[in-house]
Each structure stands twice: as C-alpha cells, then as structure tokens.
Amino acid sequence: GENVEQHPSTLSVQEGDSAVIKCTYSDSASNYFPWYKQELGKRPQLIIDIRSNVGEKKDQRIAVTLNKTAKHFSLHITETQPEDSAVYFCAASRSGATNKLIFGTGTLLAVQP
Amino acid sequence: EAGVTQFPSHSVIEKGQTVTLRCDPISGHDNLYWYRRVMGKEIKFLLHFVKESKQDESGMPNNRFLAERTGGTYSTLKVQPAELEDSGVYFCASSRIGQGKTFGSGTRLTVV
C-alpha cells in the first residue's frame, strides 16, 4: 500500500548548524510533497511544499529537494535556530494538494543553543 | 482569516462511551479532512469531504466511526462505542480546491 518512510526519528543539532530530514515514498503516482512543522501542543503548519515538476524549492533558510526517480525527498534547514525545534512531518499525495496526504512518522528536531 | 477550529481540545472517556468531535473549517474551504495520530506514530488519513459529500472515506477504521458534514460547513466525527485503541490526537484540516491544507490544533482523545 501507500507508505512514506521518514528518517531520522530524532535529530539534535547545535544552533547554526544545518539539519536534513529524508523521506522515501512508495506510490509512484505521488506528485505533491508538503512538509509540516508541529510545535509542542500546536497544530501542524505547512512550511514548504514541492510538486513533481520541479527538483528543488527554497524559501529563506528552508529548502526541499525531490528525486522522482529514486522516490526520495528531503528537507534542509540551514543556520538552525532554537525556534526551529519541533516535530517535522513529510507527506506525499497523488493528484496535487487536494487529495489525501500520506504522512511519514515524524522527526523530532532539537536545536541546542 | 480565522483558522481551523476543533472542539474539544481534550476529551477523556470510558471504554464503551460515545464521543463527538467537532471541526469548523476556514470559511470558504470546500475540502475538509479528518486525520488521526495514534501513540506517536504517523498522522493517518481518515476521510475527506468536498462540501457535504464524502469524497474518500478509505481511512475510516471501522463502523464505530461516523463522520458528517451537514450543509457543507462544520463537521462532526462520532466514535461509538469508543475502544482503548481509539485514543490519539484527531486532526481536522481544510483547504480550497487545489491548495494546501490548513490543520486545526487537534482533539486529544483518551479512552480509559
């Protein structure tokens, strides 16, 4: 069935370092890949997304890369700050943003000051 | 604009009881989704409404779960009777056609 694997499950970095979270999806028909950030006790918030017609997208300190051949996509956070600490979820969806999302299991990122 | 609102934020019920969760989507969002995160695992899809119609209910775990969206506005998710394994955080999300989903803060359900 449809499945998204996410690694690592926990990640601890020093403030200012980069953080990378990787996901692999199984459904080759997936064409929309959002990333959500969930701070403790708050709602998951969309931080960046990428569609299958591009290989990379950047928004300030956050970037996402997509390798459709390998069915991999990754989140890159540069110059990490303590406020980046949260659980990050990757997800994949068929037929664009409207369809259901298949989520990864989440990565707990801790940025040490 | 106001965000996606969910009620209650927390609910503790006994096994066998009934619980109804409510979601108020962002005004104008025709798409409404229910998701659930159980025991720190992945967030799993339950179902998708387009206006008042169920577009996809492939994620509903069993017939103890009933979702409605009368009039295409707010939605309710009823669990009857609740079992221990139903414990988790239930998220609602909404979106306009073709756009990304905005999530609510979730309802934490604990069945004891």
Image (spheres, coloured by chain):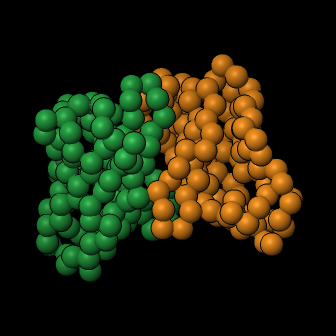
Q: Position of residue B98 (x, y in %)?
A: 44, 24
Instruction: State the image quarter where residue A46 is shown.
Output: top right
The residue lying at 64 percent from left, 59 percent from top is A107
Chain shaded green: B
Position of residue A72 measured from the top left corner of the image (x, y, whole percent): 70, 37
Q: Which chain is orange?
A: A
Tally of numbered discs: 0
The quadrant the N terminus of chain B occupies is top left
State whether residue B31 appears in this view. Answer: no
**Quarter that holds the C terminus of chain B:** bottom left
Residue sitting at x 31%, y 44%: B25
Image side of residue A10 versus residue B69, left or right: right
Residue visible at 27% across and 65% down in the picture: B8
The reply to whether residue A48 is visible in this rendering is yes
Picture coordinates of residue A40, whole percent (x, y) = 54, 68
Residue A77, percent from left and from top: 77, 50
Is A57 placed above or below B10 here? above
